[in-house]
Amino acid sequence: MAKWRRIRVLKRFVYERSRTFWYEKDLREGWGTPDIGLSVRIDLHDTEGTLNWLKSFSESWMYNEKEIEVGLAEKHYFANAKLDGRIIGYTKVGTKRVYIYDFDRCLPLPDDVSFLYHVYVAKEFRKNNIAQALITTVMSDLVPKGYRKMFCHIAEWNAPSIRLFESLGFRRVADIRFHRFFRMLKVWASRIPQDHPRKISLSMPDLLR
Ligand SMILES: CC(C)(COP(=O)(O)OP(=O)(O)OC[C@H]1O[C@@H](n2cnc3c(N)ncnc32)[C@H](O)[C@@H]1OP(=O)(O)O)[C@@H](O)C(=O)NCCC(=O)NCCS
């Protein structure tokens, strides 16, 4: 393991903190059809292609073993966007049970709730509405299956991602912060709009109450 990586792992073990905004989309509200300039094809079912593509990234968080293990067991979406047969973006959306990296544990989801883990578009193809197309294609597949909501969480600093989700009608519903000191996790949450953050135990309804 490279020296810098060992230092990062050690730092993460001793102390870690993060703040994310949780967003919710009511799938019954609908959404517009994204206008993609390029001839991109969204493939909802090419899980193997997406996973192989994710493995090629040097950033280890892109291919998280626990997320993938739960994702394969629960048949999560590993949808990709292809241009001329080449993958240029993907999204990962969970149902039933999701592994939340920040908390290093699985949370059960209500039957009609989905959770978008991540969406990514290769740098040179950004701002062509490809992320919107990936997300709306998954949402369109979920609605006839009885899903009513999609949640996602976004790091507070990620302005492009916040813009993306707000452009699709996602509403900010919670502000979640965690601190972990020698693996002891403490999570605070505040519902938006709301007053003071409060310490919570970890379960999906509790997170969003
Ligand atoms: C966030 C990300 C997925 C957006 O992908 P994209 O294909 O460029 O997004 P889209 O073209 O579909 O854009 C959708 C909306 O977001 C806005 N947007 C996208 N990138 C933006 C940026 N850098 N700054 C401001 N707004 C941005 C677009 O303007 C558009 O909004 P509009 O319809 O109101 O104009 C991409 O920048 C990315 O892969 N980032 C790195 C990974 C990441 O942060 N993922 C999100 C974590 S869940």
Image: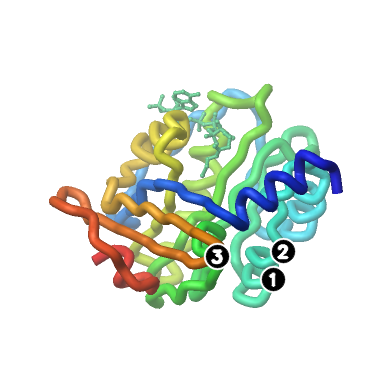
Residue indicated by mark 3: 183
Applied colour scheme: rainbow
Residue 112 in view (yes/no): no
The residues tagged by marks 2 and 3 sit, at their Cα atoms, a distance apart of 19 Å
Where is residue 13 drawn, in percent x and y? 62, 57
- Is residue 119 shown left or right of residue 203? right
Name the quarter where the C terminus is drawn: bottom left
Label 1 close to label 2 by CB (< 8 Å): yes
Q: Residue at x 49, y 29 (%)?
A: 35
Q: Choose the circle earlier in sequence order: 2 or 3.
A: 2
Q: Amino acid at mark 3?
A: Arg
Camera-side residue of 72 and 1:
1
Where is residue 150 drawn, in percent x and y? 40, 58
The residues tagged by marks 1 and 3 sit, at their Cα atoms, a distance apart of 22 Å
Dot 1: element: helix
Q: Residues within 10 Å of mark 1 (few under 14, many from 20)?
A: few
Find out if the beta carbon at label 1 lies less than 8 Å from the nearest ligand 1 atom. Answer: no
Whether residue 8 is situated above or below residue 184 in the rendered picture: above
Residue 77 in view (yes/no): yes
Which residue is situated farthest in the left direction here?
A: 195
The circle drawn on residue 69 is 1
Residue indicated by mark 2: 65
Label 1 close to label 3 by CB (< 8 Å): no
Q: Choose the circle earlier in sequence order: 1 or 3.
A: 1
- Is residue 148 shown left or right of residue 97? left
Whether residue 207 is situated above or below residue 175 in the rendered picture: below
The label nearer to you, 2 versus 3, is 3
Camera-side residue of 39 and 75:
75
